[in-house]
Image (spheres, coloured by chain):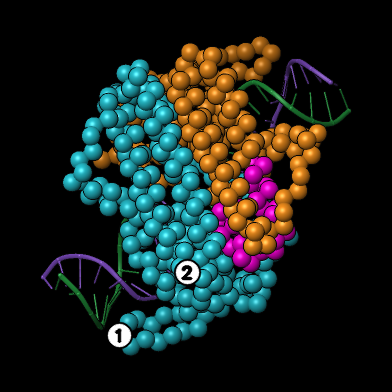
Chain colours: A orange, B cyan, C purple, D green
Amino acid sequence: MVRDLPETTYAVLGLLDMERASGYDLAAFADRALGYFWPISRTLVYRELGRLESLGWVESEPVPQDRLPDKRVWSSTEEGRGALTAWLAQPAVPGGADRNGFLVKFFFGDRMSPEAMRRLLDDYRETLEATRADLAALIEHLAGVPDGRMGRRSARHGLRTAEARLAWIDEVEAEMTGTSQLPPAEEADPHDDSAHHQATRVAQEARETA
Amino acid sequence: MVRDLPETTYAVLGLLDMERASGYDLAAFADRALGYFWPISRTLVYRELGRLESLGWVESEPVPQDRLPDKRVWSSTEEGRGALTAWLAQPAVPGGADRNGFLVKFFFGDRMSPEAMRRLLDDYRETLEATRADLAALIEHLAGVPDGRMGRRSARHGLRTAEARLAWIDEVEAEMTGTSQLPPAEEADPHDDSAHHQATRVAQEARETA
DNA sequence: AAGCCCATGTAATGAGTTACATGATTCG
DNA sequence: CGAATCATGTAACTCATTACATGGGCTT
C-alpha cells in the first residue's frame, strides 16, 4: 500500500482545491488560512506542489505576464479531489498539538531568577495577546465572507485557546507573586500600544525569516 | 559564536539536573514531566546525552547490576549547570506552539460528509477528555510532591487549554447541528469507557516517582 | 510459551527550516 | 537609490520518528 503522505501535502491540495493559484499566492493563502495551526513555509509549498504533480493530483498551466514575472497556475485534478475526499474521510492523527516553547522553559522555573521569570511570563502574555487580537480581527473579517465559515470556526479555536492561556497566566502570576517567586507586574503604559503591534509583526516575521 | 542548540537538548539537561538517571529512566521521566508539551522519544534522549557529553555538560558513571543489565548513570556537570542557567535567562523562542492535526482537517470540513465531521469532532473530544482526565490526575498527584510545583502549574496550562477546546467543541456542535452540517450527537454508552482508557497515554500509567 | 521490563544503542528515512540564487518592476 | 513585491526554485542541514538489533530476567 501507499505510504501515507504528510498532512501538509493534503493541506496544500485542499487549499488549491478551494482556489487555483500560483505557488507564490498559495503560500500566502496558506499563511492566512492555516498559519495559526499549521504553518507551511513558502519553499515547502513548492516542494509539495512538485509531489502532488507527480501523483497526478494537481496540474499547472503557464500564465505569461507583462510587467510581472510569468507564473504557473495550479489546480487540482479529478484524481486529486478524490484523494482529498478520501483523506478527509479518514480519522485525524491525534498527535501534532504538542510542543510549547514557553512551557519547556517555564517548567524549569525553579532555577530561574524572579526577574527572568517575570520576563518569560510577560513575553508569553504579549505573544498571546497579539494572537488574540489577530484572531479576533480575522474572525470579524470572515464574518462578511461567504466561504469563511470554517475558517472563522478554526480561528475561534485559536482564540479560545489563547484566552484560556491568558487566564492561566493570571492564575500563576497571582500564585507566584504571593510566594515572591515573581516580582509584581509593572503597570502597563496606556499610551504605549506599540509594543503590541510590534509583537504581532515580530511573531509573524519570526516564522518567515528567522 | 556557538550555534544555538535545540530546546530538547536543554530540556534533557534540565531534567538530568533535577535527578541523575540512566538514559532509560530519563526518557521515562521526560515523558512524565514534559510529555504533554514537549515530547522526547527515547532514542532522542540517547542522542542528546551523547551531544551533552561531548559538550562537557554531563558526565556518566557505569553502574553494574546483578539481575538487570548494567547501566550508565548520567549527571550534569558544573559547566552544564552554567549552560542551563544561561539558557533559562534567555527569552523563549515564540514559535513551537503550533500544529494541530485535528484543525488542519476540520478547516476543510465543507468538503466532508456530516458523518465524517461527526466522527472527527467525536475523536477530538475523546482525545481532549482523556488529556483532561490525565492532567487532572497528575495535578492531584503533584499536590503532595515537594518539588512538584512547576510541574503542577505546567499541567494546569494543559488542563485549561483542553477545557477551552472542549468548550469550543460544544460551541461549534451547537452551531453546526443547527444548520444540519452535523448529525446530532449520539448518547454515550455509559458501559463503554474502553475508548477513554485506550486514548490515555500509556506512559502516564507509571507515575511513581523514581 | 508469549510477552513485557530493563538497558543501550544503530540505521534509515523524512519533514521542515534556512540560506542562497536570479531578475524585472514599482514605490518612497 | 534602495527596498519591497512578484515569482520560482535549489541546496544544505537538522530535528525527530520509526524500525531494527541484542539479550537476560520476570510474569501470566
Q: Where B43 sits versus A101, above or below?
A: below
Check the image and name the residue furthest to the top. Answer: A66
Neighbour class for label 1 at 10 Å: few (<14), some, many (≥20)? few
Q: From the viewer's perspective, is C5 left or right of A120?
A: left
Quarter of the image for residue B202 reads: bottom left
Query: Which image quarter is the C terminus of chain A in?
Result: top right
Q: Nearer the viewer, residue A112 or A77?
A: A112
Task: Determine the residue positioned at 51% across, 65% down.
Answer: B148
Magenta run includes residue A104: yes
Residue A193 is marked as: none
- Between D10 and B145, which is closer to the camera in this rendering? B145
Kind of element beneath mark 1: loop
Q: Position of residue A187 (x, y in %)?
A: 76, 44
Q: Quadrant of residue A57?
A: top left
Question: What secondary structure is found at the residue carrying circle 2?
Answer: loop
What's the chain of the residue with tag 2?
B
Asked if A2 appears above or below A154 in the picture, the reply is below
Residue A49: x %, y % from top left: 47, 29
Residue bounds of the magenta highlight: A101-127
Find the residue positioned furthest to the front: A178
User: Which secondary structure dominates the residues rendered in magenta?
Assistant: helix
Name the spot of residue B137 as percent of width and height, x first: 39, 58
Disc 2 marks which amino acid?
A: Val
Please give the label number shown on residue B145.
2
Residue at screen point 66% across, 74% down: B79
Would you name the residue on which mark 1 appears?
A: B67
